Image (cartoon, rainbow, N blue to C red):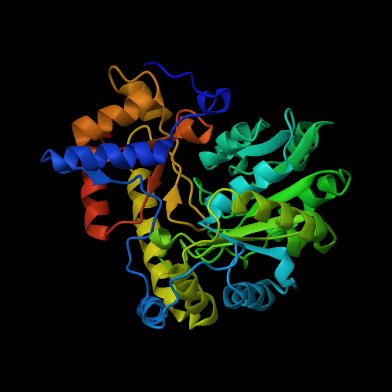
Amino acid sequence: MEVDLANRVQRIKPSATLAITAKAGELRAAGRDVIGLGAGEPDFDTPEHIRAAAIEAINRGQTRYTPVDGTPELKQAIINKFDRDQGLTFEPGAILVSNGGKQSLYNLMAAVLNSGDEVVIPAPYWVSYPDMALLADGVPQIVEAGQDQDFKVTPEQLDEAIGEHTRIVVLNSPSNPTGKAYSKAELEALGAVLRQRPGVLIVTDDIYEHILWGDEPFHNIATACPDLAERTVIVNGVSKAYAMTGWRIGYAAGPTSVIAAMKKVQSQTTSNPCSISQAAAVAALDGDQGCIKPMRQAFRERHDYVIQRLNGMKGVNCTASDGTFYCFPDMRGAINAMPDADNDVNFAEKLINDAEVALVPGSAFGLTGYARISFATSMENLVKAMDRLEKVFGSA
């Protein structure tokens, strides 16, 4: 029997990053020594005090349903975090805890988009932004920001992209896949455009907030332009900074009417996030933040090594990142020099088969001819991976 599928699911594609990770896993299972540079998760264990909090929660019987929008303890920890780190004030009704930042973002799209509403998304973008908009009957409006402009959208581009049907503008800083972060001055310039568009909701994805080593501290649109905070939804989570990807805890903070609508969506899809994970997230947000520093330092050291090695290869040009555990090299020269690789997808397939190195093609992130490389793996693996790539590409 052939089943007709919904139009909405036929509009979207599977996650390219998950597909590359799965392909690498299949080849390893078949005995191939594939080094995966595709996965977007820290390779560190969750810090001990966070794990201990989860065990304590189990032992005290915290294994039942919680409120849909999160436990009071976790919501207060999130409120404390915003006050401590960014000087932002929220009430409990302005906070929603979800099964990861991805669900927070999807809840938002489902809650506010009507058919035909446009979502302005700078490219390169995290792979899921456009498909979430499509699932919610929205229209992704992609604004390309290439390496020549540091992978950051300009005020002029933003002004041109926003039209009468624009409902949401998405900002992600530091960025997946480029690792680039907007400065406060750059956000203020974007804010000047958004200030003239009062009907547009701003979404800032801050999931890499603490993995930052640029020249200035972290800023988002709400801290750079406080007058825009009332129509900004901040999405964050514990996955990246605390090595808690599998715990699946993300959160959103924003206008209470929007958060209430997002809660309604969540109540009819997943209900509350895992009660034990929520207890662990309280320990992460309220506990000693010193656990972040050694992980960030390791990512910075790996970043410096990978950038230096990539820029020593023929046909590769890679700018430095400001944070995250990604870089986004321009591979067009290497692609053009490789037989039978007429695009970045074929190029990535050949690398995983011939060099046993898995990376994600740039087209998955909205910019062809590039690749996302994750250095969230050991230095030993990175050395081997760079040696293999250099053997394929040659030295510059």
Left or right of residue 280: residue 390: left
In percent of the image, x 44 and y 48: which residue is there?
327
Q: Quadrant of the C terminus?
A: top left
Residue 358 visible in the current orientation: no
In percent of the image, x 43 and y 71: which residue is there?
63
In percent of the image, x 15 and y 42: which residue is there?
29
Please name whichever residue, 170 or 328, is drawn nearer the observer in this view of the structure.
170
Vertical placement of 85 versus 28: above or below? below
Residue 177 visible in the current orientation: yes
Q: Position of residue 105 (x, y in %)?
A: 60, 49
Count the labels in the image: 0
Please name whichever residue, 142 or 118, is drawn nearer the observer in this view of the structure.
118
Q: Position of residue 239 (x, y in %)?
A: 46, 61
Vertical placement of 180 versus 129: above or below? below
Vertical placement of 38 versus 278: above or below? above
In percent of the image, x 38 and y 26: which residue is there?
345
Q: Position of residue 11 (x, y in %)?
A: 55, 25
Q: Quadrant of the N terminus?
A: top left
Left or right of residue 228: residue 259: left
Residue 94 falls in image quadrant: bottom right
Left or right of residue 29: residue 215: right
Please name whichever residue, 217 or 137, is drawn nearer the observer in this view of the structure.
137
Q: Position of residue 91 (x, y in %)?
A: 74, 72
Residue 220 falls in image quadrant: bottom right
